[in-house]
Image (spheres, rainbow, N blue to C red):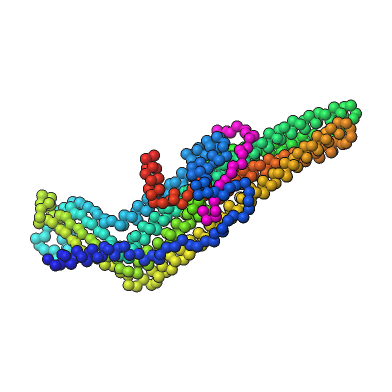
Amino acid sequence: MKKPKSLALTLAATLALGACSMAPTYKTPEAPVADHYQPAGPWTTAAPADQLPREGWWTLYGDARLNDLESQLLAHNADLAAALASYQQSRDFLQQVRADLFPQVQVGAGAVRNRQSDNAALRGPTSPAWYDTYSLTGQATYEVDLWGRVHDNVAAGRASMQASAADLASVRLSLEAQLADSYLVLVGLDRQIDLLQKSVDAYQRALQLTRTLQAGGAVSGLDVNRAQTQLSSTRSQLSQTKAQRDLLLHAIAVLVGQPASSFTLEAKTDLPALPVIPVGLPSTLLQRRSDIAAAERRTAEANAQIGVARSAFFPSLTLSAGGGFSSGAWGNLLTAPSQVWALGPSLLMDIFDGGRRRAQVDAAHAAFDEASAHYRGTVLTAFQQVEDNQSLLNNYGNALVDQNDATKAADHTLSLSMALYKQGANSYLDVVTAQVASLDAHLTLLGLQTNQLRASVGLVRALGGGWESGDISPEVLARDAKAQAKK
């Protein structure tokens, strides 16, 4: 009676060893983090409860049409659907590696008609040439995770799935920001088209004026030619701007998953107001950027793979049990004499492999170093992008103040030039020069307003949108998986 009890204790101790892991203790790679951002500008320092909206950050711009386009993107964008499918693959792969934590059970049944060779060795004279074999068997195998190979594999798979979830969030934010940026540029082009069309109308009236003055002998044909040149050039600029709008409209159609041929957006000349964007401390960026989270999770995955590689130096223990029935006649298959069974452990260990396992461990360490370096680079790039867009917002704001003054001065100069020309006090060359300066000033002003809004979109993207690192926790991913399965 002692042997079964000793065997049970041995098995229990063996199973308990399954909690071991050969992976190094994981620590997030260190990355340089500044205490504060450099420039000051049109944003605010966020309090802990004052962050970007978790869903629909684009609502900051207060544009209903932009809101509708973003909703279409989330529902129909092909790149987003592909990223979602990629995440689902990583989630399913985790389920595959998790299966190794449990016993593997198989059942089988067979009915075989056999024919022996008449010249078979050791065949007796009474052995039948033909005979049947019927079987009904089951087998269970379980690899005891002595050195944590299976658990490290599962840990690596879980980290990979979380990285894929963060990648999905990165793709989503990138597409959302791309759509918002394209939309703002489109509205900016609509404003330029409106300005150019008004300029064409004004230059048309100026051309008519010069023709009238020429007919009265007050001016020469040189003024008429100059007026015609200015009108034709502006018309050409108008056509070029319309072409830019068409191409941008087609790009937006692709983003929202619609054919470019049937997609239209009415012209709109009102740019959204510049939103006040809550900017937290630099340290919060590590939790607000999905690409940083993805890089960190891949570092954790590489760390777990070191444990998998190390475990290959130790023996693997497999417990197996099988049993069933085997008979040459169907009628007595399920009887006691037809029973078969096998039970026992097996131990396997590589003795010599020509350095393969050592190379695998070294490669795993190198992969961890690569992932760590990529993580640090991602963090530094994130800080650069925040600083870049804050600097753009700040300097564009300063430039707009001066450009407003320049535009007013150019308009005043144009009015004076036209009045003096009508009185014959100056040439039409002065009028053309003033027209060019005024139009350029207005176009520059519109471009600065659009670019400042685009920089705000860039800042939102650099801050990670409304994403947080908790979005890739196992609980959240499990909840999202259930929600996706119901769709």
Quarter holding the N terminus? bottom left
- Left or right: where does residue 242 sit relative to residue 25? right
Name the residue: 13% across, 63% down.
Answer: 123
In the image, is residue 419 above or below residue 52?
above
x and y percentages locating residue 268 in the rendered image: 62, 33
Q: Nearer the viewer, residue 60 or 369?
A: 60
Occupied quadrant, residue 223: top right
> Would residue 9 be visible to someone looking at this image?
yes
Relative depth, front residue between 2 and 321: 2
At a point 33% along the width and 65% down the height, the residue shown is 20
Q: Is residue 314 left or right of residue 57?
A: left
Q: Residue furthest right?
A: 217
Specify whether residue 278 is painted magenta: yes
Residue 170 appearing in the image: no
Q: Is residue 230 left or right of residue 266?
A: right
Which residues are drawn in magenta? 260-284
Q: Indicate left or right for 254 with 132 as reference.
A: right
Q: Main secondary structure of the magenta part?
A: loop
Relative height, residue 150 to residue 402 (above, below): below
| Residue at x 19% of width, y 62% of height | 343
Q: In the rendered view, would you say 423 is above or below 381?
A: above
Based on the picture, tell me whether residue 409 belongs to the magenta stretch.
Answer: no
Q: Position of residue 251 (x, y in %)?
A: 57, 41
Query: Front-most of 121 and 42?
Result: 42
In percent of width and height, residue 110 lies at: 20, 52
Q: Position of residue 446 (x, y in %)?
A: 68, 40
Quadrant where the C terminus sits is: top left
Q: How many marks?
A: 0
Q: At x 20% / y 65%, what residue is drawn?
A: 9
Residue closest to the eye, 98 or 281: 281
Name the image quarter holding residue 97.
Answer: bottom left
